[in-house]
């Protein structure tokens, strides 16, 4: 086995130079393929049944809760009294 301390030290090529290696895979194509495959698996009846079983076992038992992922809007805050009347004027 070669000793790493005795190997010749070669500088690594910098990104953007012709010596820099090309990507092994196209990042965008690989990402699209992975997303399509993952979301395709999540949409299968088997996956839906498993998700429903997990929800039934571990989900909240409180009724009347808003569905997850949807933000609820709060009522606007009550208007404050005019600060000049309460605090007075400085000048």
Image: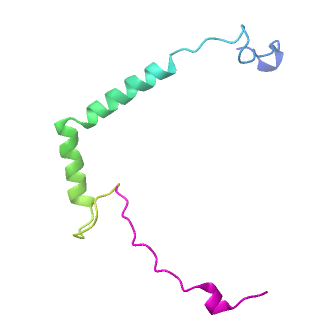
Name the side, left or right, on which 29 lies relative to 42: right
| Dominant secondary structure (helix, strand or loop) of the stretch shown in magenta | loop
Q: Residue at x 39, y 72 (%)?
A: 75
Say which quadrant the C terminus sits in.
bottom right
Task: Specify the farthest residue to the front.
Answer: 91
- Establish if 58 lies above or below 88: above
Q: Nearer the viewer, residue 77 or 41?
A: 77
Q: Nearer the viewer, residue 71 or 42?
A: 71
Q: Residue 52 location, x and y as percent? A: 20, 50
Q: Nearer the viewer, residue 1 or 38?
A: 38
Q: Residue at x 31, y 33 (%)?
A: 39
Q: Residue 83 location, x and y as percent? A: 62, 85
Name the side, left or right, on which 29 lies relative to 13: left
Q: Please name the colour scheme applied to the rendered image.
A: rainbow
Task: Specify the farthest residue to the top.
Answer: 18
Residue 2 figure quarter:
top right
Q: Residue 63 location, x and y as percent? A: 21, 70
Q: Which residues are magenta?
A: 70-91
Q: Residue at x 49, y 80 (%)?
A: 79
- Establish if 38 lies above or below 79: above
Residue 4 figure quarter:
top right
Q: Is residue 72 magenta?
A: yes
- Establish if 44 lies above or below 76: above
Say which quadrant the N terminus sits in.
top right
Q: Is residue 81 magenta?
A: yes
- Establish if 88 lies above or below 66: below
Q: Residue 21 location, x and y as percent? A: 65, 11
Q: Residue at x 76, y 16 (%)?
A: 12
Q: Nearer the viewer, residue 38 or 80?
A: 80
């Amino acid at each position: 086995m070669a000793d790493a301390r005795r190997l010749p030290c070669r500088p690594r090529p910098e990104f953007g130079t012709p010596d820099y290696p090309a990507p092994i895979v196209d990042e965008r194509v690989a990402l699209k393929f992975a997303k399509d495959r993952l979301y395709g698996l999540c949409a299968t009846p088997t996956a839906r049944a498993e998700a429903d079983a997990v929800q039934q076992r571990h989900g909240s038992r409180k009724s009347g809760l808003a569905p997850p992922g949807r933000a609820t809007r709060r009522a606007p805050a009550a208007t404050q009294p005019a600060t000049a009347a309460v605090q007075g004027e400085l000048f």
